[in-house]
Amino acid sequence: MEHEQVNEDSSNPFVRYSPPAVDAVEAAFVLARQSGANSIEPIHILIGLVRDREGIVPQILAAAHAQISAVQHDIEQLIAPMAPHTLSELPFSASMRSMLLGADREAKNTGALLTEPQHLFLALLIDADSPEARVLSKYGLDLDTARTLVESIK
């Protein structure tokens, strides 16, 4: 069975990520460590994307008529706080790895040269039963709607 990789360079899995997308992944690591999580989860990246007030995700939420502070509150409620970690590295959970692969596919499907924050956001909606997708669905966002909004914002 062939294994899918995040991208071609195994020494740096984020070589095809734009600087803002790398920042989102790094923010997810920091949030996971601060919350005491044992691994980096998709919810951590969603929180980072929503908190980046200059990024595209708040624009998508605004276009969906969602109050950003309410969305942020709802997603932060999904994280059970524990003692912060001092570990220098945390692994990606299986769901996070799957989400990153989905983001890469979203980028490739749109012809983008780099994976961007909007591709990470769209990948969070691929599994409609995920906690992230369920929270976003409260604000009228599903994968098709989000794709349409991304296209209208670009």
Image (tube, rainbow, N blue to C red):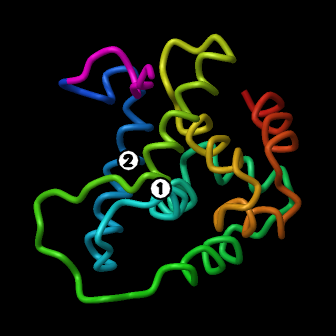
77 with respect to 129 (left or right): left
Q: Are marks 2 and 1 in contact (CB under 8 Å)?
A: yes
Task: Find residue 35 and report its horizontal and vertical position in percent.
Answer: 33, 79
What's the residue at 43%, 37% (across, down)? 20
Task: Find residue 1 and report its horizontal and vertical position in percent.
Answer: 45, 22
76 with respect to 147 (left or right): left
90 with respect to 65 (left or right): left
Using the image as rendered, state which of residue 9 and residue 65 is in the foreground.
9
Q: Is residue 8 magenta?
A: yes
Question: Which residue, given by chain and number where applicable, does mark 2 sit on?
Answer: 25
Using the image as rendered, state which of residue 105 and residue 118 is in the foreground.
105
Query: SS class of the residue under badge 2?
Result: helix
The magenta region covers 1-10
What distance separates the C-alpha of mark 2 from that of mark 1? 6 Å
| Depicted 65 relative to depicted 3: above or below | below
Task: Find residue 67 and report its horizontal and vertical position in percent.
Answer: 76, 70
Q: Amino acid at mark 1?
A: Ile
Q: Amino acid at mark 2?
A: Val
| Depicted 84 relative to depicted 97: above or below | below
Q: Which mark is residue 45?
A: 1
How many numbered discs sit on the rendered protein? 2
